[in-house]
Image (cartoon, helix red, strand yellow):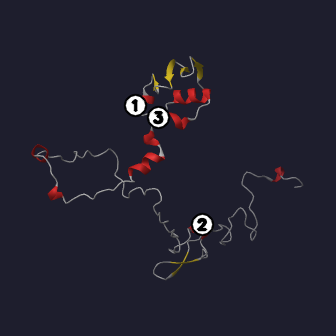
Amino acid sequence: MFMVRPIDGNEFLVNDDDKDDLVNLIERTCICREFQIDMLQCKHALAALRACKKPFIDFCSDHYKKSSLVDTYSRVIRPVRHKSKWGVPQDISLIVVNAPLWVSQAGRPKKSRIPSSGEYRGKKSRTCSWCKQAGHNRQNCPTPLRFIVSSTSKTQPTQTRKQCKCGGCGGLGHNKRTCSHGQTSTPDSWHDEDVIGV
């Protein structure tokens, strides 16, 4: 959202919020110096070209065009000779360039590398924690819960919930309060005069 003010047909004043930039399309320069250093339009030059409705491709360097790339590889490319036949000056051959010193980064190192784009990423097969079979997890395990096959091929019943024991009749599955076999005892705090109809 730049405001472009033409000075003449080739110079433009582009307002970039906090400062003004002067763009010259003939000399291909801008105050930000990106136009002349990269030899490619900066954002101010693009705004000026859009304001005067000129094509962008005409104001970039020939190095960015397809014709330059084709012309580079159109000539014969000679192969490089063996390293022993290189004519290296004596002062250059004495210079030893070592690898930079390794500085370990903070944090736990990664155990596996990050695959690059387009590289095959094998999916990790899921293993069920109940039946120890691959292809599913325990949420959608087809094996019944009562009989789970372990890795040693032994059938083991699953742990069931412990049933409560009744204190009155001694039966399982209920307690003394909900027991229907025996008569429910009235609490000691009840009296005959508290019961209606007695």
In the displayed structure image, the side of residue 20 where residue 91 appears, left or right:
left
The disc at residue 37 is 1
Could you tell me residue 28's position as x and y percent? 47, 27
Q: Position of residue 32 (x, y in %)?
A: 45, 24
Quadrant occupied by the C terminus: bottom right
Name the element at disc 3. Answer: loop
- Label 2 neighbour load within 10 Å: few <14, some 14-19, many 20+: few
Q: Mark 2 points at which residue?
A: 139
Q: Measure the alpha-carbon separation of dots 2 and 1.
A: 61 Å
Mark nearer the N terminus (2 vs 1)? 1
Q: Which of marks 3 and 2 is nearer the N terminus?
A: 3
The residue indicated by pointer 3 is 40
At label 3, which amino acid type do we have? Leu
Residue at the front extreme of this rendering: 75
Q: How many labels does the image show?
A: 3
Q: Classify mark 2: helix, strand or loop.
A: helix
